[in-house]
């Protein structure tokens, strides 16, 4: 199959070995230059979607983007950034584009540093908070990281992708007359990112990514149910055709079985009664899929250190775990001794990577250990502020954007109790299955999250199914009330985590085992 003209990942071959020299030349020529790094990214992808059994669209696209950071200034240094979205016309002069971006970032850094110094002189008390832009030290890495796939995303024909979506959409519609509307989408891509820094780093990382979506609307007996879910992995097109078979934590079916299962659930829930809200707390069990959203919202985001330091608060808010650099809850008990949580880029799936976007080796960070708050995800700059070691969680969704501190694979740790035993010990309670919709307070100190299904538990047995229910609780109370942790650890893809302004939508992983705690039920009945 002939590849159309555009951007190819191989187009970065010609500049890869030149990047260190380009940065070194800039460092020697630009006054007050303290540090610089360059991120250059190329990607190729295919996408398609179908609606109600009919093909709607298919496309093949590419992208090329550049992000540059320079730290400069005397005394109160500052960072300057330059981000560019590029195209095929930029390829012949790509080295010159990088040089000019370094110059622009340097000018911005110098201007910011000068204004810092001016503000500190004019306002001595408040100006003391304008600290220099220091980076905690890391070992500069040189590495080549290849993509992993069986079916190369660049070789997937858009018509083939659209045919699969159409076939699956027809199968979803065929589940029954109660299925009134459905959309099935598929995406597969290969992305290559070069990172080089004035410290000598040169990292060349490629990764494949494939994702599917099923959205279903069912209506029966006057009740309407809307449900959607994603499957995905950093692998090739094969995961949509046969599922994930080589990673036990992510194991699941292909797009056909996945989408039709969502349709059957939506139809089933149309016949279920609406859950009634409770006045007070009840015993609740939350399954791994529900806990994927729970850990994301009440553990993941509050332990991103830029959010904790109030450096980034747009849309997703701040953190109840850190008031300022001197008043934090580090070392405090914020959860049950049975509960631990961590972020680990080494786990498979959407959240996997070897180095973040400032070249820091990615490593596992214990966030909560046996109920005690033990850490935050950080960048080199926030690590310097807190006197901590950088842990590799500074990433952007596109090289042209300024990185933010983001979750990788953030999860509740597995326990050693079978979920059947956790259920069997409950005299009366509720079992929440599958995530649906979150509503989280500004600092993440309380939450309301709805579930796909809610089952009543009586005398250790699962009974009546309810729809349109969920739980609400104070975050610390819910975590502290955890009285059981299952052994059924699972990891799920999150394709739409939003943070920052302008919004950066990132793919990452979340998960955990079944948990037993206490919370109030929310409902529509």
Image (cartoon, rainbow, N blue to C red):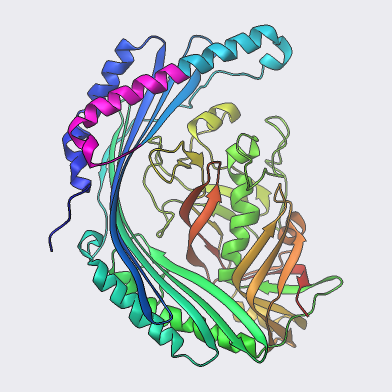
Is residue 198 visible from the viewing direction of this image?
no
Q: On the rendered structure, is 483 left or right of 201?
A: right
Task: Report which quarter residue 387 is drawn in.
Answer: top right
Q: On the rendered structure, is 295 left or right of 101?
A: right
- The residue located at (58%, 56%) in the rendering is 296
Q: In this view, does 200 lie above or below 298?
A: above
Q: On the rendered structure, is 34 left or right of 43?
A: right
Q: In this view, does 400 lie above or below 449?
A: above
Q: Is residue 109 above or below residue 74?
A: below
Q: Provide the residue span drawn in magenta.
A: 85-108
Q: On the rendered structure, is 330 left or right of 23?
A: right
Q: Position of residue 491 (x, y in %)?
A: 48, 65
Q: Is the magenta stretch mostly helix, strand or loop?
A: helix
Quadrant of the rendering where the C terminus is positioned: bottom right
Task: Report which quarter residue 293 is drawn in.
Answer: bottom right
Q: Position of residue 423 (x, y in %)?
A: 67, 80
Q: Position of residue 445 (x, y in %)?
A: 74, 51
| Viewer-nearest residue: 39 or 365 | 39
- The residue located at (22%, 62%) in the rendering is 152
- The residue located at (21%, 48%) in the rendering is 8
Residue 87 in the magenta stretch? The answer is: yes
Is residue 430 visible from the viewing direction of this image?
yes
């Amino acid at each position: 199959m002939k590849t159309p003209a555009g951007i190819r990942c191989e187009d970065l071959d010609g500049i890869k070995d030149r990047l260190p020299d380009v940065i070194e030349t800039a460092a020697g020529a630009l006054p007050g230059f303290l540090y610089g790094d360059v991120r250059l990214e190329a990607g190729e992808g295919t996408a398609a979607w179908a609606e109600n059994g009919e093909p709607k669209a298919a496309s093949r696209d590419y992208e090329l983007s550049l992000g540059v950071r320079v730290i400069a200034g005397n005394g109160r240094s500052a960072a300057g950034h330059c981000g560019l979205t590029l195209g095929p016309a930029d390829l012949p002069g790509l080295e010159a584009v990088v040089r000019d971006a370094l110059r622009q970032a340097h000018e911005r850094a110098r201007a910011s540093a000068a204004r810092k110094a001016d503000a500190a002189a004019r306002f001595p008390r408040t100006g003391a908070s304008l600290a220099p832009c220091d980076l905690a030290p890391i070992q500069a890495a040189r590495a080549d990281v290849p993509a992993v796939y069986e079916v190369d995303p660049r070789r997937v024909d858009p018509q083939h992708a659209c045919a699969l979506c159409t076939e699956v959409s027809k199968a979803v519609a065929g589940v029954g007359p109660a299925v009134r509307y459905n959309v099935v989408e598929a995406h597969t891509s290969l992305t290559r990112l070069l990172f080089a820094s004035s410290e000598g780093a040169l990292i060349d990382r490629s990764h494949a990514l494939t994702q599917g979506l099923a959205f279903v609307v069912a209506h029966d007996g006057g009740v309407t149910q809307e449900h959607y879910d994603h499957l995905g992995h950093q692998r090739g097109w094969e995961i949509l055709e046969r599922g994930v078979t080589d990673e036990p934590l992510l194991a699941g079916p292909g797009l056909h079985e996945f989408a039709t299962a969502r349709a059957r659930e939506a139809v089933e829930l149309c016949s279920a009664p609406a859950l009634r809200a409770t006045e007070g707390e009840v015993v609740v069990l939350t399954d791994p899929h529900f806990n994927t959203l729970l850990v994301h919202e009440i553990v993941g985001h509050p332990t991103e250190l830029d959010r904790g330091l109030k450096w980034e608060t747009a849309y997703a808010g701040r953190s109840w775990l850190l008031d300022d650099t001197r008043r934090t809850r580090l070392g405090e008990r914020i959860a049950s001794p049975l509960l631990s949580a961590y972020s680990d880029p080494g786990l498979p799936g959407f959240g996997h990577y070897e180095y973040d976007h400032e070249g820091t080796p990615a490593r596992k960070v214990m966030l909560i250990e046996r109920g005690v708050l033990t850490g935050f995800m950080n960048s080199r700059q926030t690590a310097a502020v807190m006197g901590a070691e950088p842990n590799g969680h500074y990433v952007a969704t596109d090289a042209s954007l300024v990185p933010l501190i983001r979750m990788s694979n953030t999860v509740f740790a597995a326990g050693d109790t079978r979920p059947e035993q956790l259920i069997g010990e409950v005299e009366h309670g509720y079992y929440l299955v599958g995530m649906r919709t979150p509503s989280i307070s500004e600092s993440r100190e309380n939450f309301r999250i709805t579930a796909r299904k809610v089952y009543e538990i009586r005398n250790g047995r699962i009974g009546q199914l309810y729809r349109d229910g969920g739980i609400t609780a104070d975050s610390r109370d819910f975590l502290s009330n955890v009285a059981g942790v299952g052994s059924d650890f699972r990891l799920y893809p999150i394709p739409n985590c939003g943070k920052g302004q302008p919004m950066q939508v990132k793919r990452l992983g979340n998960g955990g085992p079944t948990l037993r705690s206490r919370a109030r039920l929310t409902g529509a009945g």
